Amino acid sequence: MTEILDVVELTVNRPREGLLAGMQGTVVELYLEGVCEVEFVNEQGETLQTLALPPDQYMVVWRSKDRTWVPIAERVATLAGRMPEMVGRELLDFARFLSAYRQPARDEHQTSYAASSNATVVREANADPYGLGGSGSPTLPDA
């Protein structure tokens, strides 16, 4: 249940208000049937928009009462539950794809560490920009 001071994320674009899916705002008022008033601010803390959102246009990402972030799995489940069945299946297939190719480093993927001024940079001997356990671009499974 959404509460005042929860942080929510837009799940739809609101072009008239200049807001895009993924933008986060703070719940400042609660109304009937899950509608809540959300304030969106810029990086300087200035209000961009304050508007009432129905529950199908946002998801909670920070619970103020518990002071915890909503787990990623719960966020994905929220979005998947709002999708048409066919799109939900594609999402599940994509999750399986990522899971199948996310494997620990093998002998041919030696990891080396190079120091930089601000952090340690990890580089693999074989370029694997997607973390899929292979070199170069990922390959999709046959449909």
Image (cartoon, rainbow, N blue to C red):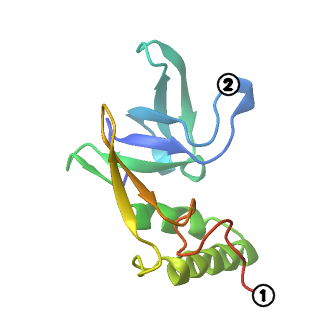
In the picture as drawn, the residue positioned furthest to the bottom comes out as 142
- Nearest to the observer: residue 53 or residue 58: 58
Q: Is residue 130 above or below residue 113?
A: below
Q: Is residue 39 above or below residue 128?
A: above
Q: CA distance from mark 2 to mark 1?
A: 42 Å
Residue 116 placement (x, y as % from top left): 34, 37
- Mark nearest the camera among 2 and 1 is 1
Would residue 123 appear left or right of 17 to someone viewing this image?
A: left
- Nearest to the observer: residue 37 or residue 85: 85
- Nearest to the observer: residue 55 or residue 95: 95
Residue marked by disc 2: 17
Residue marked by disc 1: 142
**For the residue labelled by badge 1, is the local secondary structure a helix, a strand or a loop?**
loop
Q: Amino acid at mark 2?
A: Glu
State the mark number for residue 97.
none
Would residue 95 appear left or right of 114 to someone viewing this image?
A: right
Image quadrant occupied by the C terminus: bottom right
**Residue 67: quadrant of the picture:** top left
Q: Residue at x 56, y 39 (%)?
A: 53
Image quadrant occupied by the N terminus: bottom left
**For the residue labelled by badge 2, is the local secondary structure a helix, a strand or a loop?**
helix
Residue 35 placement (x, y as % from top left): 51, 43
Q: Amino acid at mark 1?
A: Asp
Residue 122 placement (x, y as % from top left): 38, 54
Residue 139 placement (x, y as % from top left): 71, 76
